[in-house]
Image (cartoon, rainbow, N blue to C red):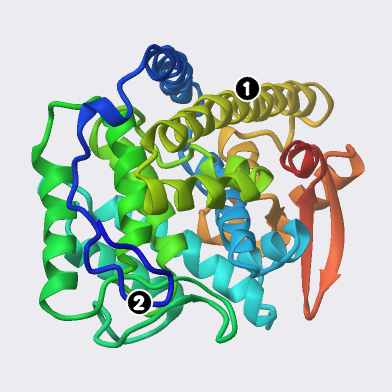
């Protein structure tokens, strides 16, 4: 294998690496921990009555952190406001919202394993970047013009061969545990770098979709980007060690620990959201039974900011009645109103606090 940072890495080996490079007791211990944490999260997800409670909260958090890794910054507040309102927002926030849309659209289209394909990856890339192009036909590099860190394989037959191999392994090779294979696939996707932009974000979406495809989790809510962001230097160091020295063990251990910790983190969020949701149901039933409905409480947990129009769209109440309901929930200390542009948004205070708690 010949690797030089300034030259296209056309000798990037096809997957899969030999087991001797990574098959250790430490890897299998870490694998057992990651599988147990993921299974516990999967078993707990059904307590949430509406998947939108997680899709519009945890997936937006994943979108924000995955974008932050690529130096695209926004705040929780700006993100949730923009998601719920018609407000003109800044380019970075729009880009994060596109990530959420790309992930959910791709998950919704995955009806069978065969849908996990290059076509799906291209759709994800296009949605994230708003670029109307496919697999790159130009040479790219990572780094700056004065300090190139990595140059992926050149476009054309070589790039096509690497990408075809990637999807062949993802769909057909079942000899390796899917969590270990997910780690390998993630490295390989980053090394192939099939698009002109957005490879990191596209690759991280493919990670969670792969876990869904393998039935390790039923919703794409595991929060892998948080761990990567918190350990960004290690993330890039382990990637380089695979490229430069073929050292797979450290990379696989890193990704298994990411699954382990983020599954536990996401489980805590799911439990906290559910407990808060139940406590608000009890509070409204006791203190404002005249406005209580299961649908009303559900809608204020489907996203952190609510507005009159959402209650109208869900056919929960007419405009005047919806306004009354939201003001009553504000009087109870559950919501707090804020004028954003020409709209009044009502933020779910405890839900926002849960999401902000890292």
Q: Is residue 290 left or right of residue 47?
A: right
**Residue 88 coordinates in the image, percent (x, y):** 68, 83
- Label 2 sits on residue: 7
Work out whether 338 lies above or below 234. below
Q: Element at badge 1?
A: helix
Identify the residue shown where x is 34% and y is 63%: 3
Identify the residue shown where x is 14% and y is 44%: 169
Work out whether 19 lies above or below 145. above
The C terminus: image quadrant: top right
Q: Element at badge 2?
A: loop
| Quarter residue 77 falls in | bottom right
**Residue 89 coordinates in the image, percent (x, y):** 69, 79
**Residue 107 coordinates in the image, percent (x, y):** 32, 50
- Label 1 sits on residue: 271
Question: Residue 96 versus residue 301: which sits nearer the camera?
Answer: 96
Q: Residues within 10 Å of mark 2 (few under 14, many from 20)?
A: some
Q: Residues within 10 Å of mark 1 (few under 14, many from 20)?
A: some
């Amino acid at each position: 294998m010949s690797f030089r940072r300034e030259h296209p890495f056309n000798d990037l080996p096809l997957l899969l690496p030999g087991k001797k490079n990574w098959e250790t007791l430490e890897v299998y211990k870490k694998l057992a921990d990651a599988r147990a944490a993921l299974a516990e999260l999967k078993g707990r997800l059904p307590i949430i009555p509406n998947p939108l409670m997680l899709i519009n909260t945890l997936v937006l958090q994943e979108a924000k952190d995955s974008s932050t890794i690529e130096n695209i910054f926004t705040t929780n507040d700006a993100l949730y406001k923009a998601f719920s309102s018609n407000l003109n927002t800044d380019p970075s926030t729009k880009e994060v919202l596109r990530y959420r849309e790309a992930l959910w659209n791709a998950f919704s289209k995955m009806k069978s394993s065969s849908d996990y394909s290059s076509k799906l990856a291209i759709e994800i890339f296009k949605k994230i970047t708003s670029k109307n192009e496919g697999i790159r036909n130009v040479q790219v590099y990572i780094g700056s013009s004065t300090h190139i860190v990595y140059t992926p394989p050149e476009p054309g037959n070589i790039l096509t061969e690497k990408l075809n191999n990637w999807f062949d392994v993802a769909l057909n090779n079942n000899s390796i545990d899917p969590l270990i294979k997910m780690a390998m696939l993630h490295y390989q996707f980053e090394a192939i770098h099939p698009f002109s932009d957005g490879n990191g974000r596209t690759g991280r979406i493919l990670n969670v979709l792969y876990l869904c495809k393998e039935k390790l989790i039923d919703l794409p809510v595991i929060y892998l980007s948080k761990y990567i962001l918190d350990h960004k230097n290690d993330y890039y160091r382990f990637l380089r060690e695979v490229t430069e020295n073929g050292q797979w063990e450290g990379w696989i251990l890193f990704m298994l620990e990411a699954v382990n910790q983020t599954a536990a983190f996401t489980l805590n969020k799911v439990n906290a959201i559910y407990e808060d949701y139940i406590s608000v149901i009890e509070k409204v039933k006791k203190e404002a039974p005249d406005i209580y409905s299961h649908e009303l409480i559900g809608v204020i947990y489907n996203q952190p900011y609510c507005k009159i129009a959402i209650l109208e769209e869900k056919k929960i109440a007419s405009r005047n009645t919806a306004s009354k309901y939201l003001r009553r929930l504000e009087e109870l200390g559950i919501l707090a109103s804020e004028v954003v542009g020409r709209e009044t948004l009502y933020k779910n205070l405890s839900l926002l606090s849960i999401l902000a708690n890292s």
